[in-house]
């Protein structure tokens, strides 16, 4: 079984999917980075009701 050449629409669709994937990875990296910075700087504090037992 041989594969034929890819149609132009598949090439464009792959490019679009790659772009969307890269944007998604960038957004996840930014949110993760902000979370790490916020936690390591000590800005995050648990609510007082959870601290007292």
Image: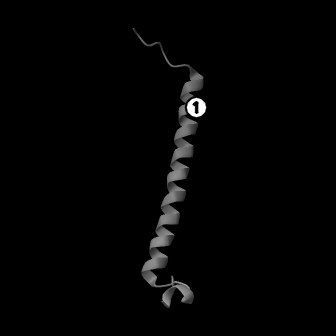
Q: How is the image coloured?
A: one colour
Q: What residue is rendered at 48% in x and 60% in y?
A: 29
Residue at the extreme top: 1
Position of residue 38 relative to residue 14, above or below, is: below
Q: Residue at x 55, y 51 (%)?
A: 23
The image shows residue 33, relative to residue 4, as above or below, that is: below
- Please give the residue where the numbered disc 1 appears in the rendered image: 13
Instruction: Say which of 35 and 13 sits in front.
Output: 35
* Depth order, front residue of 4/45: 45
Residue 40, given in percent of the width and then of the height, sits at 42, 79
Q: Is residue 53 above or below residue 13?
A: below
At a point 54% along the width and 58% down the height, the residue shown is 27
Residue 37 x, y percent position in the rendering? 46, 75
| Element carrying mark 1 | helix
Rendering quarter of residue 12: top right
Relative image position of residue 50 (x, y in whole percent): 52, 85
Image quarter (top left, top right, bottom left or bottom right) of the N terminus: top left
User: Between 10 and 39, which is closer to the camera in this rendering?
Assistant: 39
């Amino acid at each position: 079984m041989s594969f034929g050449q890819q149609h132009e629409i598949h090439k464009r669709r792959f490019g679009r999917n790659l772009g969307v994937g890269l944007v998604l990875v960038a957004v996840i990296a930014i949110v993760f980075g902000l979370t790490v910075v916020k936690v390591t700087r000590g800005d995050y504090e648990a609510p007082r009701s959870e601290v007292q037992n």
